[in-house]
Image: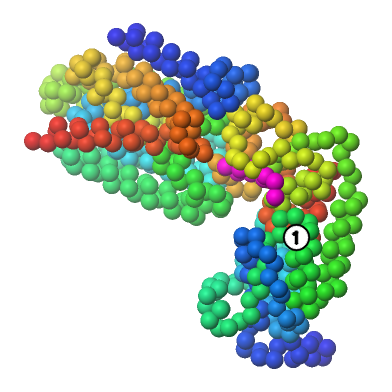
Amino acid sequence: MERGAEKARYSPQRHRVLGVILCVLCVSLVALPGLPAVAAGRVASLNLCTDQMLVLLAPEKIAALTPLSRDPALSFVASRAEHLPYGAQTTLTLLQQERLPILRIALAQDFAGIRRMTRLLAATLGVPERGEALIAAMDHELETLPHPSHAVRALVLEPRGLTAGPGTLMDAVLRAAGMANASDGRRVSLEALVSQPPDLLIVPSPPAYPSLATVVLRHPALANLPRRSIPPALTICAGPFSAAAAAMLTR
Amino acid sequence: MIRWLALLLTVLAAVSLCIGDATLAPPDGLIFWQLRVPRTLLGALVGGGLGLSGAVLQGALRNPLADPGLLGITGTAGLGAVIAFYWGVAATFPPVLMAGGLVGAGVGAGFLLVFAGRSPSGPSLILAGVAVSAIAAALLALALTLAPNPFALTEITFWLMGGLADRPLWQVMLTAPAILLGGAILLSLGPGLDALSLGEETARSLGVPVTRTLRLAALGTALAAGAGAAVAGSIGFIGLVVPHLLRPWFGERPGALLPAAPLAGAALLLTADMLVRLAPMVLPLSAAPPVGVLTALLGAPFLVVIARRMAP
């Protein structure tokens, strides 16, 4: 009964599946002013990162997520996304022609950005209190992190020799964990890494299936460096769960 | 002459151990043993295997264009290695990587043998090799597209162009026995190849087991060139160029080229790999290009020159 009433209130046009399309601009734009709160309607996400925010905030309003949201290697909420609808593949242009309301979200690169993104989405979805609850839980986790006794210079090494430089999400995670970032954002070769080793090497945990790029992260030349593996599901997207990545580094 | 080649190779190997992007000097233990030594050893082994395979193939097929890369043997070897590697089998049991490469190379070399038996004309054999290479490259791209790891497809340049960077020492140790065994087989074929250069009929009349010689040439090439391709990708044109570079000094007789070919192949690949490593220090490059890019850029014009010389 309750559910039916809710559904009737939230979907005035049942055939119209997509109420709001969440779309992420990968470039860091100034956060655009949000849409008027769409307490009504159902919501589709076109991006792994917004998938996860939708699952956390308003799973009952989800019209569609990307298939990636169900992959436990990439998605923090894979287990919860399992029974939710997925498959939003339609191009943005087509949706714009349909005059669907589209909310563009700048990808967060630090914890202030995560708070902003969470508030904006929570307000748009008409669930501001859930947003505040997620932020409060994240802030609590960040405040209770133990800090290392001495300054640790950590380097986040990604496949193909890429490193997380200043201004990246992992840089913010390192700082939250009380570590200094040893990377200037440039690619490093194995030789350069061995000749100027950081105190700690942070690598993504090995994927189920290998590639040359991920196998090199376990090259014997790096075997003597202290290292910490961190699951990519925690670091690909910025979200309230990014605090868990910092917590993992301090343990 | 052989002594000079051996000396040249020793000098090149020593210089290769001193070139890297950390320092231009002999480095400390870790970089030396885990990065420079495997790279230099692998370059010498792969280059030697390719050079010797090229010399044997050009002699056995009596075709100056024969080369393990052009004939598709390194291509099918790479395909076999890719299938073994990206589906995780080689991660749990590394020798599977080598086995995959060798099975692939065996299939390529076996096809070549059958085709060469039916249609001995030079150009048609090369064309068949081109077809095998194309099929191997297409299947390689397909395998990398279907591979479960998202980085797989971006690694197609490594498998098609080859590279010697950042290979761990255990992979070199896995390759070495196969290349050395293949090399030993190929080196033993000298007298048979000399007789074959007079034509199959004459060779038979001289008591040379022609079929056996050709089979051993295919097997040795699959081992010597295929094992390298399983670890370093398809590095092209070394096998094509080496015999042509050696003929002015060692003569036309195929058997005379064999002892020198692995030394020259190793020296050539080590030189190309050093140039590639030095490139980012001289040119505005963010990373060293794959060594196969350089061997193809230098080797392909060579192919054109040889083809023009062959034209009636």
Left or right relative to B171: residue A16: right
Q: Determine whether B284 is above or below A237 in the image.
A: above
Which quadrant of the view contains residue A26? Answer: bottom right
Q: Is residue B197 magenta?
A: no
Left or right relative to B165: residue B74: left
Residue at figure coordinates x 46%, y 51% from the top left: B143
Residue A235: give x, y in percent of width and height. Answer: 71, 52
Q: Main secondary structure of the magenta part?
A: loop
Residue at figure coordinates x 56%, y 16% from the top left: B26
Q: Chain of mark 1?
A: A
Q: Quadrant of the C terminus of chain A?
A: top right
Q: Which residues are magenta?
A: A157-167
Estimate how packed mark 1 is, as few (under 14), some (14 to 19) or many (20 or more) residues with alpha carbons within 10 Å: some
Left or right relative to B179: residue A54: right
Q: Nearer the viewer, residue A79 or A99?
A: A99
Q: Nearer the viewer, residue A186 or B307?
A: A186
Q: Is residue A166 magenta?
A: yes
Q: Quadrant of the N terminus of chain A?
A: bottom right
Left or right relative to A222: residue A116: right
Q: Is residue B94 visible?
A: yes
Q: Is residue B216 visible?
A: no
Q: Nearer the viewer, residue B137 or A10?
A: A10
Which quadrant of the view contains residue B115? Answer: top left
Residue A226: give x, y in percent of width and height. Answer: 75, 33
In the image, what residue type sits under mark 1? Gly
The residue that disc 1 covers is A113
Which residue is situated farthest in the left direction here? Answer: B312
